[in-house]
Amino acid sequence: MPSVVPITSENSRNSDRKRPMTNKRVAAELVRIAKVLSGGQFVNPSVCLDPDRKVNERELTRLLRQGLAAEEEAVHLYEFIADATDNELVRSVVQDIADEERVHVGEFQRLLNELVPDEQEMLDDGAGEVEDKID
C-alpha cells in the first residue's frame, strides 16, 4: 500500500476527488509546478532579451508580469510542500519562504503600478466587482 501524505486532493488541481494524495501524486504535482516555474508554461523571456539592446516599456512590463506570475507559482509550490509534510521544521521554514515570495509579488506589482498608468485602476475595478458581490 502506498504511503499517504496528510493532504487531500482538495488542495490540488484534482479537487473533484476527496481521497488522500499518495506520495506518487504529490511528486507528480511537484514536477508539474517545477515545470511552470522553469518557464515550461510561460513565454521564454530570453526571446526579447537580445544582449545588444534594452527592452522597450511594453516588453519590460511583460517581463515584470512574468516575474510576478513566477512568484505566485513559487508561493503555490512552497505552500504545497508545507501542507504535504508533518515535519514541523520543514513546514515552518517552507511557509516562511512562501511568505517571502508574497512580498516579492508586492514588489513586482508596485513596479507595474508605477510603469502602467491604469494598472491600479484596473486592480481597483476588479476588487470593486468582488466588493459588489460581498455587500
Image (spheres, rainbow, N blue to C red):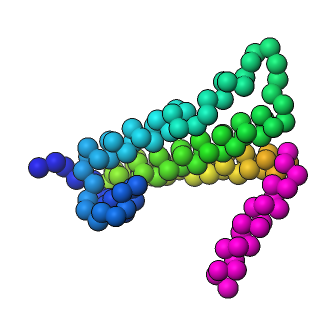
The image quadrant where one finds the C terminus is bottom right
Horizontal and vertical percent position of residue 125: 77, 67
Q: Nearer the viewer, residue 22 or 62?
A: 62
Q: Is residue 3 visible?
A: yes
Q: Residue at x 74, y 18 (%)?
A: 50
- Looking at the image, is 50 positioned above or below residue 20? above
Q: Quadrant of residue 28?
A: top left
Horizontal and vertical percent position of residue 71: 60, 44
- Looking at the image, is 35 positioned above or below residue 9? above
Q: Residue at x 37, y 62 (%)?
A: 15
In the displayed orientation, state which residue is furthest to the right: 117
Q: Is residue 128 magenta?
A: yes
Please identify the dominant SS of the magenta region. helix
Q: Nearer the viewer, residue 114 or 58?
A: 58
Q: Is residue 35 magenta?
A: no
- Looking at the image, is 111 positioned above or below residue 128? above
Q: Residue at x 77, y 34 (%)?
A: 59
Q: In the image, 3: left or right of 50?
A: left
**Span of residues in magenta:** 115-135
